[in-house]
Structure formats: C-alpha cells, structure tokens
Amino acid sequence: MNVFVTGGAGYIGSVCVEELLDAGHAVTVFDNLSEGHRSAVDGRATFVQGDFADRTLIHETLGRVRPEAVIHFAASALVGESMTNPSKYFRNNVASGVNLLDATVAAGVRKFVFSSTCATYGPPDRVPMDESLPQRPINPYGESKLMFEKVLGWYREIHGLQFVAFRYFNAAGAGRQFGEHHRVETHLIPNVLAVALGKKPHCEIFGTDYPTPDGTCIRDYIHIADLAQAHMLALDPSKSGFFNLGNGEGFSVRQVIDVCERVSGRKIPTIERPRRAGDPPRLVASAQKAFSELGWKPRFPKLEDIVSTAWNWHTRHPDGYPD
Ligand code: UDP
C-alpha cells in the first residue's frame, strides 16, 4: 500500500516506518522535526518536512501523494507538560489534527490509523482495562486524544472515513535501527538507563505514596515493534474501531528500576520526589480485543526483553541521534 505517516521521524513512528517498508509498502513521512529526528527516518521512505498546522501544505501534500492510508503518530505526548501548557495539547492534537483529517478526506483516503492513549481513560475502576471502561481523563494530554477520537467517530459517520484508533499503554524498547531519543527526556526507562550509562548521577521516583504495593505508579510497558505490528494489521480494510495495546502486566516504577539494574548490570541510585501532576496510580491493559479481532500477538511481552532492546540501543547511541 501507499502509506502516509505523520510523526514518522519520532520514536514509535520511526520503527513503524521501518516495518512498513520491510513489508513492501511505499511510505511518505510527514514530520515537523520538533520532536523527531531526520536521521530516524528510514532512507527508503520519502520525507516531507512540514506541520499540519499549515492547512494549505497538508492539503497540497496529501493531494499529491494520494495515499491509501494515513497513520497519524505526530502529537504532543507528555502528561506532565500538558498540565502546565494545555494550549499546546489542544492546538497540536486537536485543532491541527482536524486539518490533517480534512486533507485526508479531501484526498479520498480510505483508512486512518490513530495513535491514541490509555490516558483517555483516567484512573480506571478496574484493571486490566478493556475498551468498555468509561473515559474520564485527568490531564489535557488524555483529554486532547479523547477529543480527537470523538472527531474521528463523526468523520466516519459523516464522511465515511474508516479508522482504527489504538490506545497505547507505555511504549518502550527499541527496534533494530531506531530507538528512543527525546530532546528533553521525561520517560522512565530512558531516564533510568541514562543513569546506568553514567550520564546522570541518579534517577527520580515521582511519588512513593500511591495506593500500590510499593507506593510507586504501575504501568504496562509494551515494545514499540509490537505497537508497529498492530499498525500493519490495522491497514486491513476490514478492521476498524478502538483497541487497547499493552501486555496485560503492570510494573511499578521501582520494579522497572530493578529490571534496568539487572539488564545493565549497573547500580542505579534513586531519589524520591513528590508525585508528578496528572499521573494515575495504575494503568494496565487488557488487549483481548486486539488479540481476537486483529490477530495481534506481542513478540516481546517480557519487560526484561523490552529493557534489553532499549539498553542495547542506548549503549550503541549514547548521545541519541546526531540531529
Ligand atoms: N517516572 C518517574 N521518574 C522519571 C520518569 C517517570 O518516577 O524520571 C514515573 C512517572 O511519574 C509515571 C511512570 O514513571 O508514574 C511512567 O512515566 P512515563 O513518563 O515514562 O510515561 P507515562 O505513563 O507518563 O506516559
């Protein structure tokens, strides 16, 4: 298929682009490089630098490329930042996203695959979390993704645009070539591994008084190559709807640090900090729907294996990408 990928220079997008190309698809990457890296774009893809805040540019580009599917990764995606700068989240994730959707419809595209998030649920009444849970986000990041999910529902009803929306749990690990490099790193695993690499003296634990067995937040970590695989399955025209993507197992911040110590063989000093605003205590997926309806099966379900791929990438790229 001819596939248009927004955010294809970013962490999850770069790995998905590589997998799409390996599977024989033609790929155009559209990215403003605000978070992404030019050198994270697979050399076999066509690259367009741009921002879909620019309505004319995205209409022209999609009208020229005429893809069969759009996979939309590009977004602002930090819970903590969204609690101090909500405007950025509603502008980038909702307002600009609507420009992309309008251009998608105008270009006659049949299928739209959207990166949503478990943050759309807010703190769940029960875990593991399936898709039937009420969505009550507690931060602007989750709210902005939920708003876009709703827009998608209306575009399907009114314009007939078919979509798959994936609610990711915590993306982690690295692909064969591409890994995680945020210019300002806020995520747990890369921050912990930076300590193991000797780049930072200690890692921070945000909140030790949550109602969890060791007092730290619990998350469900999912390998990015497994996320990428789900996007390939979503291209099937018969697939549509909302799907959780996670491994169904939760790990606390302290447990993640322990695994990072084991995998790296290095001692990782920690400092306890207050809670980070907007963090729910426990998010663990049920991905049964993706298993049964998409035939999705994670290849790297074990946290040790996920962290090993990340450690491998970070030891080979201690300073991340050059650009
Ligand atoms: N966290 C932490 N120290 C860090 C980074 C994150 O204790 O340096 C915690 C964070 O508060 C959350 C969990 O680790 O409870 C996962 O955070 P991350 O930012 O990786 O992903 P999120 O769940 O926010 O998408």
Image (tube, rainbow, N blue to C red):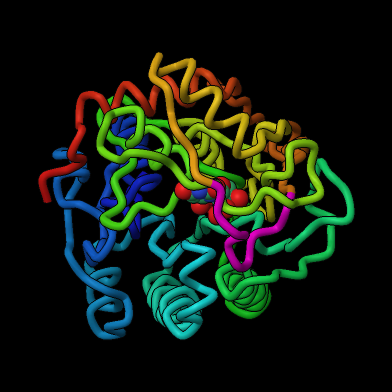
**Which secondary structure class fits the magenta region best?**
loop
Q: Is residue 273 something one can see in this rendering? A: yes
**Residue drawn at x 22%, y 62% as measured from the top left:** 33
Position of 247 with respect to 320 (left or right) is: right
Question: Residue 84 lies in magenta, yes or no?
Answer: no
Position of 48 with respect to 66 (left or right) is: left
**Residue drawn at x 42%, y 36% as measured from the top left:** 192
| Residue at the farthest right position | 125
Position of 15 with respect to 40 (left or right) is: right
Q: Position of residue 311 (x, y in %)?
A: 36, 25
Query: Which of the pair 185/197 is nearer the observer?
Result: 197
Eyeballing the image, is 191 above or below 291? below
| Residue at the farthest left position | 322
Query: Which of the pair 149/218 is nearer the observer?
Result: 218
Query: Which of the pair 227/316 is nearer the observer?
Result: 316
Q: Position of residue 2 (x, y in %)?
A: 33, 49
**From the image, which quarter does the N terminus lie in?**
top left
Q: Position of residue 312 (x, y in %)?
A: 31, 21
Q: Is residue 228 something one can see in this rendering? A: no
Find the magenta span and give its range: 272-281
- Rendering quarter of residue 179: top left
**Residue drawn at x 80%, y 37% as measured from the top left:** 213
Eyeballing the image, is 194 above or below 160? above
Q: Report the number of discs.
A: 0
- Rendering quarter of residue 153: bottom right
Position of 18 with respect to 224 (left or right) is: left
**Residue drawn at x 42%, y 22% as measured from the top left:** 267
